[in-house]
Amino acid sequence: MIQGIPIQYFLIVSTIMFFIGVCGFIIRRNLITILMSVELILNSVNINFLVFNRYLYPHQLQGNFFALIIVAIAAAEASVAIALFINMYRKFNNIDVENISEMKY
Amino acid sequence: MELNQIMFFLLSGLILLFSVLTITSRRILRAAVYLLTVLVATSGLYFLLKFEFMAAVQLTLYAGGIVVLIIFSILLTSHISHKFEKPELVNVIVGSVTGLVGCATAIWSIMAFPFSPTTQPALDVNMKQIGMHLMNTGHLGYALPFEVISVLLLASMISAIIIAKKGN
C-alpha cells in the first residue's frame, strides 16, 4: 500500500495505456509499429499484476511471478516476430501489412 | 502534495504522453525511442511499488533487450529518413472509437468495483524470497512455470534462427 495513492489511479493509468496499445494496433500498418503496440499492451498488463500484488495481496508473490513470466514471453515473442519480419523484408521488400497477404514459401 | 504523489503523477504523465507519441509518430526510429521512454517510466512505477527486482528486470530485459532488438530490426528493414504516409481516416476513426469506448467501460467498472485488501501482514520482497519461491516445488512454488519458460525461450531462439537464416 503506497501512501496517498489509491489503487484506482494505477489501474486507470494502465487501462489508458492498454487502450492506446489497442488503438495503435488498429491504426498502424507497419509491422514493427504493431509489435511496439503489443509491447505497450503487455507492459500495461504487467503494471496491473504488480499493483494487484502490492495493494490487495501483499502477503504473497503471485503477481510478481506472473509479471516475470510475461516479460519472458514478450522477449520470446519479439525475437520470433522480428525474425519473421526480416524474412518478409527479404521476400517482399517492405513490411506493411496489406502487402503481405501470404506467408508460405 | 506528498513526494510520492508527485513522483506518481510525473511517471504516469510520462507514460501516457509517450505511449500516445509511440503510436502517432510517423518516423519509426523516433517511435522506438518513445517506447523506450515508456518502458523506463514503467520501471519507475515498479520502484514506487517497491518491487525492486521487477524494476531491474524491466530495465534490463525490456529497455535493454527488446528495444535494442526492435531498433536493430528497424535499421535492417527501413530507411531512417523514411516517413510514413498518414494512416487512413477510416482506420483512425475505428481505432479511436474502439480505444475510447473500451477505456470508458474499463474505467467505469474500475471505479464501481469495491477493492478489499487482505488484512494479513505484508511480505518483505527480497531476492532470497524470490529465489526460494522460484525454485520451490511445494506450496506457492514456481519451479514448473520456470522450467516451461526456459523450454519456451529455447524453442523461440531456435525457431528465430531457422526462420531468419538465409536460404533453406
Image (spheres, coloured by chain):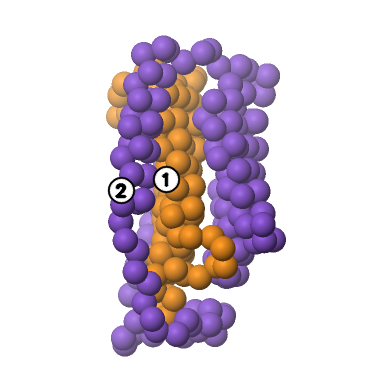
Callout 1: chain? A
Residue marked by disc 1: A15
Q: Is residue B5 placed above or below B34 in the rendered structure?
A: below
State the quadrant of the C terminus of chain B. top left
Q: Give the x, y percent position of residue A44.
A: 46, 49
Quadrant of residue B128 within the rendered picture: bottom right
Residue at (30% x, 24% y) in the render: A102
Q: Which chain carries label 2?
A: B
Tell me, yes or no, whether dots 1 and 2 are on the same chain. no
Q: Determine whether, in the image, residue B47 is placed left or right of residue B89.
A: right
Using the image, determine if residue A65 lies above or below residue B131: above
Amino acid carrying label 2: it is: Ser
Q: Residue at x 33, y 32 (%)?
A: B101
Secondary structure, mark 2, is helix
Where is residue B62 drawn, in percent x and y? 56, 52
Q: Is residue A98 above or below residue B18?
A: above
Corner quadrant of residue B133? bottom left
Q: Which chain is purple?
A: B
The image shows residue A29 at horizontal and vertical percentages of: 44, 22
Residue B68 position in % (x across, y down): 62, 45
In the foreground, B113 or B66: B113
In the figure, B51 relative to B27: above or below?
below
Q: Label 1 crowding class (10 Å Cα cut-off): few <14, some 14-19, many 20+?
A: many
Label 1: which secondary element: helix
Q: Which chain is orange?
A: A
**A34 and B144: which is toward the camera:** A34
Residue positioned 47% across, 81% down in the render = B122
Q: Give the numbered dot on residue B52.
A: none
Packing grade of label 2 (10 A; few <14, some 14-19, many >=20) is: few
| Disc 2: which residue | B109
Between marks 1 and 2 in the image, the one whose residue lies nearer the viewer? 2
Kind of residue at badge 1: Thr
